[in-house]
């Protein structure tokens, strides 16, 4: 009788937890053809799914591709696009799989996926000449990987607070089922809070917040986020840095001195692996440097590209 009561209590708790899990599901939208029509914008089908992108500037201008980080989609580059267009560049920005309005395919979200997405995107859009490449945070890892494997496609490389290694994921998120439950309860809240800290006091703060939260409402967001965190997308990029460091290439490294995510030690490791890099630290800036110090970032980028 005693064991029956214990079993009953455990069963009720499990059912309650399952109920909470589904009640807290904010992924109420499906990214399908009808939804894409409502959203507007430009989409292209690649081997892993549809990619949402924006191409701006004059057709004959030199191409520059901007790769966003791990959680903030392509609106990351709102303050850079027009400046680059006015400087004579054709700008390509896009949402990585699992972010913004790109598909959330049921695949492993790793370094290879993000590198493949970028390769297929520029190829399918018909870009055959060398282009300049910019990567931010995890997108810096994607940019360094791409440049290491396809050196013939990249002209100048700009890395902004780029990931190299040492990202520490709380162990609880690595545990199957428990990680999913915790991610549902606090995951989106946590990354939204982090995002708001990065854009604090920046122009269009409210608009950015709405765009960030909207992406989390599409089915597959949490799954893609956990997969990215559990796999090598946020792990070691040292091998690619070593390869690029041996290339005859102009590279600009931008970093906010108050960045607690990409630490000074990481930046020093990057500098050691990229001996010819031009390093530009920015005072009073953290990981949200492209939002809060965008004028300085833009000036550094244009100066470097125009040399």
Image: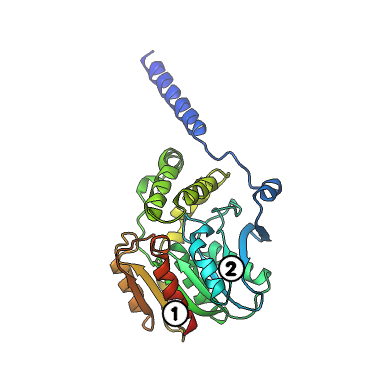
Q: Disc 2 marks which residue? A: 92
Label of residue 303 in the image: 1
Q: Quadrant of residue 16?
A: top left
Q: Answer few, some or many: residues within 10 Å of disc 2's Cα (few below 14, many 20 plus, some between 14 and 19).
A: many
Q: Secondary structure at mark 2?
A: strand
The total number of labels drawn is: 2
Q: Position of residue 63 (x, y in %)?
A: 59, 75
Q: Is residue 302 above or below residue 48?
A: below
Q: Is residue 254 left or right of residue 49?
A: left
Residue at coordinates 38% horizontally, 20% vertically from top-left? 6
Q: Position of residue 196 (x, y in %)?
A: 40, 50
Q: Residues within 10 Å of mark 1 (few under 14, many from 20)?
A: few
Q: Are marks 2 and 1 in contact (CB under 8 Å)?
A: no
Q: In x, y percent, where is residue 184?
A: 46, 39
**Residue found 39% across the figure and 47% down from its top:** 193
Name the residue rendered at 60%, 70% in the picture.
119
Q: On residue 61, which mark appears? A: none
The N terminus lies in which quarter of the figure?
top left
For the view shown, which residue lies furthest in the top direction?
Answer: 1
Residue 38 visible? The answer is: yes
* Vertical comparison of 113 with 179: above or below: below
Looking at the picture, tell me which residue is in the foreground, 132 or 240: 132
- The vertical placement of 92 against 73, above or below, is below
């Amino acid at each position: 009788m005693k064991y029956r009561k214990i079993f009953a209590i455990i069963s009720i708790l499990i059912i309650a937890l399952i109920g909470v899990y589904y009640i807290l599901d904010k992924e109420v939208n499906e990214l399908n053809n009808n939804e894409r029509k409502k959203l507007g914008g430009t989409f292209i089908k690649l081997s892993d799914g549809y990619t949402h992108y924006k191409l701006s500037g004059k057709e004959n201008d030199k191409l520059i591709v901007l790769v966003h980080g791990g959680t903030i989609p392509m609106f990351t580059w709102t303050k850079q696009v027009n400046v680059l267009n006015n400087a004579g560049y054709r700008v390509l920005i896009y949402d990585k799989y699992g972010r913004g309005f790109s598909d959330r395919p049921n695949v492993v979200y790793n370094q290879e996926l993000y590198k493949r997405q970028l390769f297929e995107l520029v190829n399918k859009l018909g870009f055959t000449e060398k282009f300049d490449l910019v990567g931010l945070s995890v997108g810096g890892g994607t940019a360094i990987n791409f440049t290491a494997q396809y050196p013939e496609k990249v002209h100048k490389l700009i890395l902004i607070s780029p990931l190299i290694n040492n990202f520490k994921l709380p162990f609880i998120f690595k545990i199957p089922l428990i990680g999913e439950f915790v991610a549902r309860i606090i995951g989106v809240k946590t990354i939204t809070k982090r995002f708001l800290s990065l854009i604090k006091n920046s122009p269009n703060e409210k608009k950015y917040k709405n765009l960030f939260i909207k992406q989390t409402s599409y089915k597959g967001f949490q799954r893609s986020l956990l997969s990215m965190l559990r796999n090598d997308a946020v792990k070691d990029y040292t091998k690619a840095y070593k390869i690029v460091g041996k290339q005859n290439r102009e590279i600009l490294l931008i970093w906010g001195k108050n960045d607690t995510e990409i630490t000074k030690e990481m930046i020093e490791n990057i500098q050691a692996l990229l001996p010819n890099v031009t390093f530009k630290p920015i005072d009073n800036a953290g990981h949200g440097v492209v939002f809060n110090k965008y004028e300085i970032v833009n000036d550094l980028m244009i100066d470097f590209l125009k040399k």
